Structure formats: C-alpha cells, structure tokens
Amino acid sequence: MSTYMAKKETVSRGWYVIDAAGKPLGKTAVAAATILRGKHRPEFTPHVDCGEYVIIINAEKAFLTGKKLTQKYYRRHSGYIGGLKEVQYKTLMATRPELAMELAVKGMLPKNSIGDKAMTRLHVYRGAEHKQAAQKPEKYEI
C-alpha cells in the first residue's frame, strides 16, 4: 500500500467557528492554527496547504494566564534609529484584542508561503457576531 499524498486541487475546505470567551488566548490560538494548517485531517500532507477556514469570535473575552498581561509586550520596529514601539498586552487586549489573537496564531504557523496563505483564511472578531454566516460554519469545541 502506498502513502496517500493530498493535492491542492482535491482539498475541500470547510468553515469552523471557535468561541474564545472564557478560554486562554494561547489555547484558542493552538486550535485555530491546527485547523488552518489542516493537521486535524487524516489526509494531512506537510508540503500541501490542506487547511480550512477559521472564524474566532469573542476575542475580547479571551484571557492571558499568569502575569502575562503586565509582563508581555508587543514590539515592532520601524527600521529607523529609536523606532522601537512597545505596547503592553494589558493595553493591547483592551484596545485591539483581534490583533493579539492574530499575532498568537501567526506565531504558531510555518514561516513560509503555506503559513502566509493560512493567515488569509483566519477571521477574528471582537464580539459574538461575524460576517460569514452564509458559509454555514461548524462550531469547533476546544
């Protein structure tokens, strides 16, 4: 018996909704990254993008454990001297929880074209409403 290799043309993509309310940010991000990558499927092939679409709702109700709210920082640099910008996660979770969730998921995906393509299939919403009701997404339990 030969090993099955998935092909990009034969991959069927479904939609999943993950509710982040009352769950740790990291555990929600792990579940989303697993689905985006396609690792939950029996026909997973590492070099083929066989992931599915993910919608994360209630991103503002996700929480960080321990002292991460005060000790963890989101840092970015403009490339110029003195261009380092730092935002404490307490501020980030209060103002832009969608960005915090996207950063967590992005860090768990491969740093190549497959990971870039997977990030385009991620939709994160602050509240309980989302715009993808027409796709009839399935609820995914963590």
Image (cartoon, rainbow, N blue to C red):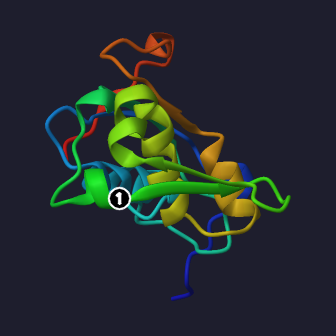
Along the line of sight, the residue nearer the viewer: 1 or 21: 21
Amino acid under disc 1:
Val
Residue at left 43%, top 24%?
125
Along the line of sight, the residue nearer the viewer: 137 or 114: 114
Residue 58, position in %: x, y?
29, 26
Residue 73 to residue 43: above or below: above
Along the line of sight, the residue nearer the viewer: 117 or 90: 90
User: Which type of secondary structure does the marked residue at label 1 adopt?
Assistant: helix
Residue 46, position in %: x, y?
59, 75
Q: Which residue is mark 1?
A: 30
Q: Residues within 10 Å of mark 1 (few under 14, many from 20)?
A: some
Residue at left 59%, top 39%?
121
Name of the residue lying farthest toward the right: 80
Residue 7, position in %: x, y?
69, 62
Quarter holding residue 100:
top left
Residue 126 to residue 4: above or below: above
Quarter holding residue 66:
bottom left
Residue 35, position in %: x, y?
43, 52
- Relative to residue 110, is residue 43 drawn left or right? left
Name of the residue lying farthest toward the bottom: 1
- Relative to residue 110, is residue 62 drawn left or right? left
Residue at left 66%, top 40%?
120
- Relative to residue 109, is residue 129 drawn left or right? left
Along the line of sight, the residue nearer the viewer: 70 or 60: 70
Quarter holding residue 13:
top right
